[in-house]
Amino acid sequence: MKELLKDRIDRWASLLFISIAIGVVVSGLDVLFGRVLLSLIATSHELMPWIPLLLGPAGIVFMFIFLRYGKESTQGMNLIFRAGHGEDVDIPKRMVLFVTIGTWITHFFGGSAGREGVAIQIGGTIGQWFGSLSKRIDRREFVVIGMAAGFSGLFQTPIAAIFFALEVLVIGHMRYQVLIPTLIASFIASNLSHVLGLEKFHFEIVPDLTLTPLVLIKLAICGIAFGLCGALFAYLLKQSKSFTQRLFPNPLWRIFIVGVLAGGLIILFFQGRYASLGMNLIEGTFALESITSYDWLLKLLLTVLTLSAGFQGGEVTPLFAIGTTLGVVLASVLGLPVLLVAALGYASVFGSATNTVLAPVFIGAEVFGYETLPFFFIVCAFSYAFNFNQSIYGQQKIAWLTEK
C-alpha cells in the first residue's frame, strides 16, 4: 500500500512539475510568435494593396525549404492529432520553427489565415518533448497539456483552452485524467503571456435581453445558422484541399498558382479588407463600423482558398471574424441586439467548424463576459447540433462512430 501511494505521489509530482514547465515554455514561444506576427501584419497593412501580389512567390520559396528540410513537420496538425491519439509518432522539434516562420510569411504577404494552428503545434510539440523525459506517464497526456497551453497563451482564454484540448481530439470522450495538469499549464500560459505583453481581444457585453420563448426561438435560429456556416467552412476547406491537390499534385506549383490567385482576389476585394486574421472585421463590428451582408462569405472563401494552397497559419481567428460578421446580418434580420449576436457568432462558428461545444461556450464568456454565458450555451448547443460532424481537423475522431 505504501509503495502504491508513493508511486501515485511520484507520478503526480512529475506530472505537475512538467505541466508548469510546459506552461512557461509554451507561453514564451507564443509571445515571441504573437508579437512578431502582429508587427508583421501592421507592416503588411502599410504595404497594401500591392503586397498580396507576392503571396504566391513567397509561398513557393517557403514550400521548397519546408519540403526539403521539414521532413515529418509537413504533416502539421495531423501529426499533433496522431500523437494525441497515442500513435507511435515523434513530433520533430523543427516543426515549431517551420510553422512559425511559415505563418509569419503567410500574414506578411496578406494571406487570409489564422494563427491558432501554430500555437497548438507549438504546444503539442513541446508537450510531447517534455513527456519524453518521463518514463512513467503516457506521452499523449502531455500532448493534450501542451495543446491547452498553446491555445491559452495565444488567446488568453484559459478555461476555453482547457476544454478545447480535452474535447477536440475525440468528440464525446473527455480526458479528465489530465484535467488538473492541463488547468495548471493553461492558466500559467495565459497569465504569463499577458505579463509579457501579448495582446488579448476583450469586449465586455451586458446583455439587455430576457430569455422569453420568442427570444429562445430566435437564438436557436442563430445557432442553426452559425452551425451551418461552420459546417460549410469545414466542408469547403476539405473539398478545396482535395481539389487543388488533384489539380496541382506538385505542392510547389500548387502553392504558387493558388497563392497568386488568392493574392489577386485579396487585392480585388476592397484592397485587402479580407487579408490576414480578420481582426479588422472583428474590431470594426464592435466599434459599430459598417459591416456588409457579404463580409462573412468573402472572408470564408478567401480563407479556404489561402489554406488549400498550403500556406501555414490556422482557421480559428478567421472563423471568429466570419461568425462575428454573420452575426451582424442575423441580428438585423431577427431583431436582436447586434453586438450580442455578433459575439455569439464569434464563438459558435468556431465551435461548429472545430466540432466542439464546451470550448466555444467558455471562449465566449471569457472574451465577452460571464453575464453572456447562458446565451452562449444556448446558441453553441444548436450550432454544435447542426454542424453534421464536420470539422477542420481531419484526424479528429468521434467516439460514438469509432465504437461501432
Image (spheres, helix red, strand yellow):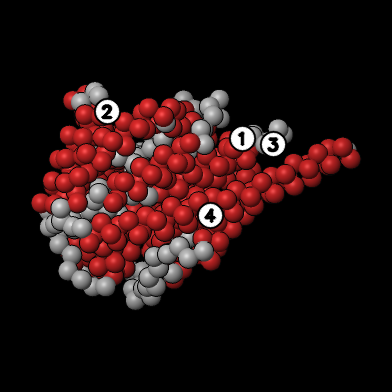
Q: Can the viewer see residue 166 in this picture? A: no
**N-term mark: 4 or 3:** 4
Q: Residues within 10 Å of mark 1 (few under 14, many from 20)?
A: many
Where does residue 273 sit, x and y in percent of width and height? Answer: 19, 58
Looking at the image, which is closer to me, 184 or 150?
150
In the image, taking residue 31 as reference, residue 53 lies left or right, namely left
| Separation of marks 2 and 1 at Cα, in angstroms | 32 Å
Q: Callout 1: helix, strand or loop? A: helix
Q: Position of residue 76 (x, y in %)?
A: 41, 35
Spatial CA distance of label 4 from label 2 is 32 Å
First in sequence: mark 2 or mark 3? Answer: 3
Disc 1 from disc 4: Cα separation: 22 Å
In space, the residues marked 3 and 1 are separated at their CA atoms by 8 Å
Q: Is residue 266 above or below residue 217?
A: above
Residue 211 vertical position relative to residue 346 in the rendered view, above or below: below
Tell which circle, 1 or 4, labels the residue nearer the N-terminal end. Answer: 4
Report the mark closest to the observer, 2 or 3. 2
- Mark sitting earlier along the chain (2/1): 1
267 up-or-down from 335: above or below: above
Write down the residue under mark 1.
139
Q: Nearer the viewer, mark 1 or mark 4?
A: 4
Q: Which residue is mark 2?
A: 251
**Mark 3 or 1, which is nearer the eye?**
3
